[in-house]
Image: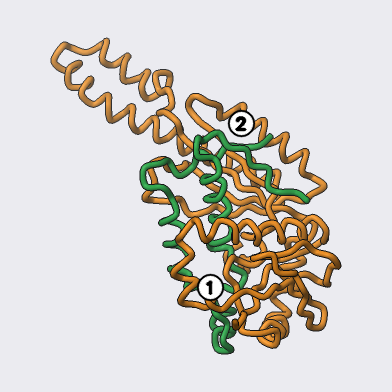
Amino acid sequence: MTQPRVSLSAPNADEMSLLELADRLLNRGVVLTGEATLSVAGVDLIYLGLNVVLSAVENLRPRNAPAAPRDNVT
Amino acid sequence: MSSLVYVYAVLPRALADVRAGIGGRPVRWVTQDNLAAAVSDVPAAEFGEAPLNERISDMGWLGPRAVAHQEVNAELHERAEAMVPLAFGTVFHDDDRVRQLLRDQAHALSGRLEAVRGCAEWVVALHLLKSPEVANEASILAARTEIEASSPGRAHLLRQRMAGLERDAARRLQADASEAVLASLRHSAADVYTEPLPTDTVERPLLRASVLVPREGESRFLDDIERLRARWAEPTYRLLLTGPWPPYRFGGLTDDQS
């Protein structure tokens, strides 16, 4: 199975990799956005408010570390 | 203990023998007409709305679960021609609710499956490591020439304006770099989505984009990235790439966003 080919140069490599992952999984790429969420919410979908999700991602970022030393791949 | 149904992704049909999901629970399928949702059972005590929102910013809790989410979706993405991965934390009360989603959103989900068929998602970021060299920019050269030709008093005034000119020139070069990278991505990818830039982080990228790339065109895309990296090189710029991801961003975009 293929994992995203992320190699990291940052000292806290695992953390940055998790940040990248969280950014993909929690960020705005939600299939149930907008109208879909509303209509589904009416039938008891437990759904994270988008604002909650976004602030969660922001809070995950270590305060004093750069947000982006996830390095690349090829 | 009561459980909820966690949805990983929606596919056109079920796959056999998928690896275990969150908490080691088996991945099973909820199907409706021409759609199949990959799901597993999760404890309500952790994935109910309130506990989930409480725990989601705790990296120690989120980490292994996000990894399990991604590992399931990576396998589905590897094995299926088309799949729409859902965001972390998409939870339903029971299978009937999932079926209802598949029924209610059948049209949208089918459209999204087609839009990402045979494609993977990559994330490209262009960072500025130090201010670009502006000494040879036309505006700076012209200003220097003018200073040399001016009286001492006027030259002094002009020199005071130099810092502003240099800042403007650097800003222009950065904007040019970001636009050039974006234009190249638009040329080599099936679709490009420019991500909003984080505002409260130490290192702010000049550009961050999700790009959708057909799997069969992957090596050409990576060649293009290498060329971009050579052009927008360190020590001034740094081009970062991660992928291939399941199409989290493009699977979730609505028509008016893409």
Q: Position of residue B109 (x, y in %)?
A: 71, 74
Q: Name the element at disc 1.
A: helix
Q: Are marks 1 and 2 in contact (CB under 8 Å)?
A: no
Indicate which disc, 1 or 2, sits on the residue closer to the N terminus.
1
Camera-nearest residue between B87 and B59: B59
B202 sits left or right of B215 in the view: left
Q: Position of residue B217 (x, y in %)?
A: 79, 45
Q: Is residue A19 visible?
A: yes
Identified at 79% across, 80% down, the residue is B31
Distance CA(mark 1)–CA(mark 2): 43 Å
Q: Residue furthest front?
A: B1
Disc 2 sits on a residue from what chain? B
Q: Same chain for marks 1 and 2?
A: yes
* Of B218 and B67, the residue lying toward us: B67
Q: Colour of chain A?
A: green
Q: Disc 1 designates what residue?
A: B46
User: Residue A45 placed where, x, y %?
Assistant: 57, 82
**Chain letter of the residue beneath label 1 in the structure image:** B
Q: Mark on residue B191?
A: none
Q: Position of residue B204 (x, y in %)?
A: 42, 43
In the figure, A2 relative to B167: above or below?
Answer: below
Residue B54's place in the image compared with A16, above or below, is below
Q: Which residue position holds label 2?
A: B229
Residue at the (67%, 72%) spot, across then down: B7
Residue B172 occupies which quadrant of the picture? top left
Q: How is colour applied across the structure in the image?
A: by chain
Question: Residue flagged by tag 2: what amino acid is it?
Answer: Arg
Which residue shows up at 70% across the image and 88% down it? B96
Within-10-Å neighbours for mark 1: few <14, some 14–19, many 20+: some
Q: Colour of chain B?
A: orange
Using the rendered view, name the quadrant where residue B70 is placed. Answer: bottom right
Q: Nearer the viewer, mark 1 or mark 2?
A: 1
